[in-house]
Amino acid sequence: MLLVVPITFRQAAAFVARYHRHNKEPRGCKFAIGAVDEEGVLHGVAMAGRPVARSWDDGMTIEVNRTCTDGTHNANSFLYAACWRIAREMGYARAVTYTQGSETGVSLRAAGWRVIGERKARGSWRDSTTDELLRQMRDPAGNGGVPRVAWEVDHARR
């Protein structure tokens, strides 16, 4: 049995650095949560913040920027569902996230999310940045070259 606990950005970032297979931690977040067992052992984290896409940053939409688990059964869907419950309580009307095109999205479907679009592979944000200061801050690998799938859950869905 898993339980939701609040965690700090640093705790979540450290977990992502240790376990995530293809992403670094986000630069910040509005909230971070953990999935712990009855003994308090952390098995997964989720970080939610402002949407990266400016068109979705309307003040009523939150993006789950990162989830990461140690492989514990159902932990990822548990975290996505918990993020949406928390976001709703905070007053958000919609939550969005992305998966890589090769991922099934089974955790999101189990948590009640739905596909809203597919994004073609593109270059990394770093490569497309002309401002040298921003360019130095961005991850050289990033998610460039990977097709993605956009997902959402909103009040009408849950």
Image (cartoon, rainbow, N blue to C red):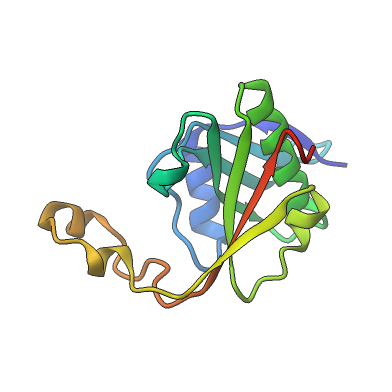
Residue at the image point whose x is 44% and y is 58% from the top: 24
Q: Is 128 on the left or on the right of 106, as rendered? A: left
Q: Residue furthest right?
A: 1
Q: Residue furthest left?
A: 132
Q: Position of residue 7 (x, y in %)?
A: 58, 32
- Considering only vertical position in the picture, is 2 above or below 8? below
Camera-side residue of 96 and 3: 96
Q: Position of residue 45 (x, y in %)?
A: 62, 45
Q: Is 84 on the left or on the right of 24, as rendered? A: right
Q: Position of residue 88 (x, y in %)?
A: 68, 27
| Image quarter of residue 103 | bottom right
Q: Position of residue 137 (x, y in %)?
A: 23, 54
| Figure label count | 0
Residue at the image point whose x is 79% and y is 48% from the top: 111
Quadrant containing the C terminus is top right
Q: Is residue 122 visible?
A: yes
Q: Residue furthest top?
A: 90
Q: Is residue 41 visible?
A: no
Camera-side residue of 68 and 90: 90
Quadrant containing the N terminus is top right
Q: Is 125 on the left or on the right of 98, as rendered? A: left
| Image quarter of residue 151 | bottom right
Residue at the image point whose x is 39% and y is 73% from the top: 122
Camera-side residue of 65 and 149: 149
